[in-house]
Amino acid sequence: MSSTEQKTILLVHPLGYSARRANTDVARMANIMPPLGLASISAYLEQYDIYNDIIDCYAHPQSDELIFAYLRRYRPPYIAFSCTTSSFYDGIRLAREVRRIDPQTTIIFGGVHVSAMREEILVYHDEVDVTVVGEGEETLKHLLQDGDNPSEVAGICYRGDNGHPQFSGYRKNQLNLDDLPFPAYEKLTGYPEVYELPIFNYPATPNTSCISSRGCPYSCSYCDRSVFRRSFRYNSADYLYRHMRYLNERFGIRHINFYDDQFTFNRKRVEEFTALVKENPLGMTFNCAARAEHLDYDLLVAMKSAGCWMISLGIETGDPDLLARHRQNPDLEMMREKILLIKKAGIRVKGLLMMGLPGETEESIRKSQQYVFSLPIDDFNLAKFTPFPGSPVYKEIKEADGALGTFTDDLERMDCMQFLFIPKGISAKRLEELFVQFYKKHFQRPRVLWGYVTMLWKSPDSWRRFLGNLGGFLTFIKTNRRIQQ
């Protein structure tokens, strides 16, 4: 930091649990994703001479003292915590210590959980001065420039003159994503080496995640849309190409996972992007997520030629009735057809599923197994359904008051790796048994086993990581617990 740069704000990504348990967290062994939202905010603020830094506690669990030392050295007037639901209380713990170190520091909370809860955060947590609701870049800029008049800053909750929480209303204008600078990756200590994509989900290193859109045009029951609400925007093909080139030239990135909900929603954008890559190759590969209805063979061939290595599809469940209850445009036969086209184009397929949705039964789980095992998918992820605050199904479950099943509303355990909701008609013990059984049957199939063997030459670094963390993975399989005590 030069002597002319007075730090204005420290941006923090909390770990979510005690740092001493980080080395036994199987989720961290398998995947450490950069806090892209904070990196985008950081770069945006710097454009307006609002100097800042980022401390990512998830990538660097022993960061408490770094945060406190930073506050003592630079005395920034603001500190902001970006929290998921499960990391929210860890953020509160850090905020209490910040308040003790410097009572004058304005403490800001943002992120998906905060956007869902809004004023309620201020009602129950005196440590928090302001919450950012929705997209953070422009709101934080105005807050830091006009903090003396919070009522004039759209997109925040604050305490009014009477001490009661006030919501200033949603921002009327949304940012043009192509106007944003590239995220401040350089402020993420150890980037890109300390950040790792899920094992067996990439061919080469260094690799990273990237976001080229915000929001989703669909309204599925299990998705929390509190940040972007019903909006859906995306970067142009030109911006997307320049972003990839920047990551390659500046950081040596060889593979990117586009962490978008709907990468292929705008077909023309993808066509233009693949044309740019073919005209000026970058020597990079990429993954993306898509909905089956936005894929066709010609597009898939173009994506393959531009370096598409794997596509993730949200299957959710193989029971058509259960799927229709929770998702728009449910069509398992169309899903099967599109998966066959992806494979025909020479692209790997990853299926994303969840177990334990309201209405789930042993029969629906059996149907899911039969359906998934009949598909030529290369990898899959089975999540434990979690009703997050802000999702339609969370409200439905709460209002049903036990009629749909039992729900333990424990924020710190909302990580999609624990059953907090148990559907009516099935026990928690049986649900856990079926979950383990699903995974074991998947990995016992010869075709699946051979697929992982081929990763020895398709993704050698994945095998290095897998063998290096073998003890932790075996313990997880035995105990079915994300973090060992």
Image: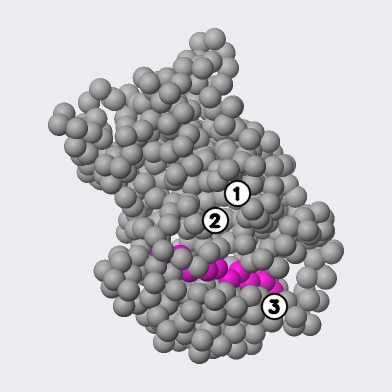
How far from the left and from the top, in percent, is residue 31?
A: 65, 54
Picture mark count: 3
Q: Residue at x 28, y 25 (%)?
A: 146
Q: Residue at x 62, y 59 (%)?
A: 482
Which residue is denoted by mark 3 in the rendering? 440
Q: Are marks 1 and 2 in contact (CB under 8 Å)?
A: yes
- The type of residue carrying mark 2 is Tyr
Q: Who is closer to the viewer here, 181 or 195? A: 195
Residue 186 visible at all: yes
Does dot 2 land on a helix, a strand or a loop? loop
Q: Residues within 10 Å of mark 1 (few under 14, many from 20)?
A: some
Question: What amino acid is labelled 3 in the image?
Answer: Lys
Tell me where residue 355 appears, x and y as whole percent.
Answer: 51, 75
The alpha-carbon separation of the residues under discs 1 and 3 comes to 27 Å
Measured in 3D between alpha carbons, the distance from the residue under mark 1 to the one under mark 2, in whole angstroms, is 10 Å
| Nearer-N-terminus badge (1/2) | 1
How did the renderer colour the structure?
one colour
